[in-house]
Image (cartoon, grey):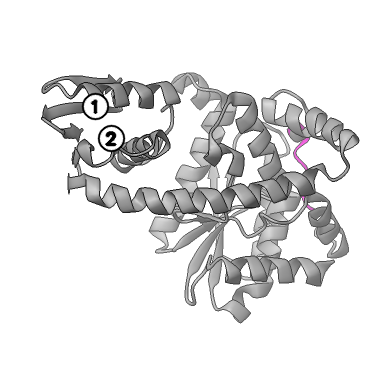
Amino acid sequence: MVNNIINIVKNNIVENSLVKKGDKIVVAVSGGPDSMCLLDTLYRLKDELEFSILVAHVNHGIRIESDLEKEYVEKYCKERNIPFFYLKVDVPKLSKEKKISEETCGRMVRYDFFEKVRQENNADLIAVAHNLNDNIETILLNQIRGCGLKGLIGMDFKFNNIIRPLLTIEKKDILVYNNELELHPCFDKTNEEDIYLRNKIRLQLIPYLKELNPNFVTNISRMRNILKEDNDFIEEYTNIVFDKVIIKIDNSKIVFDFSKFMNEHKSIQKRIIRKIIEKKISNLDGIENIHVLDIIKLLNNNIKGKKYIIGNKFTIEIIKKNIAIIY
């Protein structure tokens, strides 16, 4: 199994062009089975594929085992001369201050730290340990919350500077990998508590769906791959239209000619608007379908001076016929 997993990771990296020769990769490592499999496979492949690695580990200050996990990951790194970077944050306290959930706060702290380590070490990429099961959970979670085509695809091998070399590997195979190499990873007990919706999907929904169809994971994975091909084609076309739409982009605003896409199919209209918003604020957090539909309505009315405002995120304003600005 060990060689098989290493070969799958290698193929995922090569076939999806995740890493270039000479790249430096920040490996996000919690000390759990997934991240230890990721770290160990990348360590074994780094010379062959000619990249280098360093490790970033975050202690969320939630569990008493966290200090032991830090020691475990640090020991693995020291034995192999892998640079190790560590952050300890009181996530429960910070989440209350920011009035967000511990889950959201923990994710924000992690990725902010990974990016900080990447920049300070002139690294190129951040590798995270999402696997096939994680992607199935994400797809189901998106369906439950209501999603479009992109949500049914879930995660991809690469998003901006984040790569996921384990994305096609099942959790059960990752556990075998850890056992065969006697890595003795740490286990987060909160993953076995149904306190979060994702955990309920993992612990209750997926086992039930497997009872209904033992090939459930394979079938969802196949569906995801088919939908991704369709989405890639639509995205390609969207990008062609987007390039025609944009008049000016700078750090504070984007000026665009909406007459260039308002006659397109509604699907393309929505994608162009999301793309403009994402280009302006770097993400689509909190941007829902209703917001996009309201913006389309604003543009269709085409009245100079009319605005659409979403809190302190952005404002879209029609500055003259067929021309709008987002700032």
- Residue 299 is marked as 1
Provide residue 214's location: percent of width, then percent of height: 88, 42
- Please give left or right for residue 82 compared with residue 112 in the image: right
Q: Is residue 313 magenta?
A: no
Q: Residue at x 39, y 51 (%)?
A: 237
Total tally of numbered discs in the picture: 2
Cα–Cα span, label 1 and label 2: 8 Å
Residue 166 or residue 66, whichever sits in front: 166
Dot 2: within a 10 Å radius of its alpha carbon, few (fewer than 14), some, or many (20 or more) residues?
some
Q: Quadrant of the C terminus?
A: top left
Q: Quadrant of the N terminus?
A: bottom right
Provide residue 156's location: percent of width, then percent of height: 57, 51
Residue 81 or residue 231, whichever sits in front: 231
- Please give left or right for residue 226 compared with residue 277 in the image: right
Kind of residue at badge 1: Leu
Q: Residue at x 28, y 40 (%)?
A: 261
- Residue 248 is marked as none
| In the rendered image, the vertical position of residue 249 relative to residue 144, given as above or below | below
Dot 1: within a 10 Å radius of its alpha carbon, few (fewer than 14), some, or many (20 or more) residues?
many
Residue 30 or residue 313, whichever sits in front: 313
Labels 1 & 2 near each other (Cβ < 8 A) = yes
Provide residue 215's location: percent of width, then percent of height: 84, 45
| In the rendered image, the vertical position of residue 189 relative to residue 241, given as above or below | above
Provide residue 5's location: percent of width, then percent of height: 76, 65
Residue 4 or residue 257, whichever sits in front: 257
SS at badge 1 = helix
Kind of residue at badge 2: Met
SS at badge 2 = loop
Decide whether the magenta segment is chiefly helix, strand or loop: loop
Over which residues does the magenta segment extend?
185-190
Residue that badge 2 annotates: 262
| In the rendered image, the vertical position of residue 18 relative to residue 249, given as above or below | below
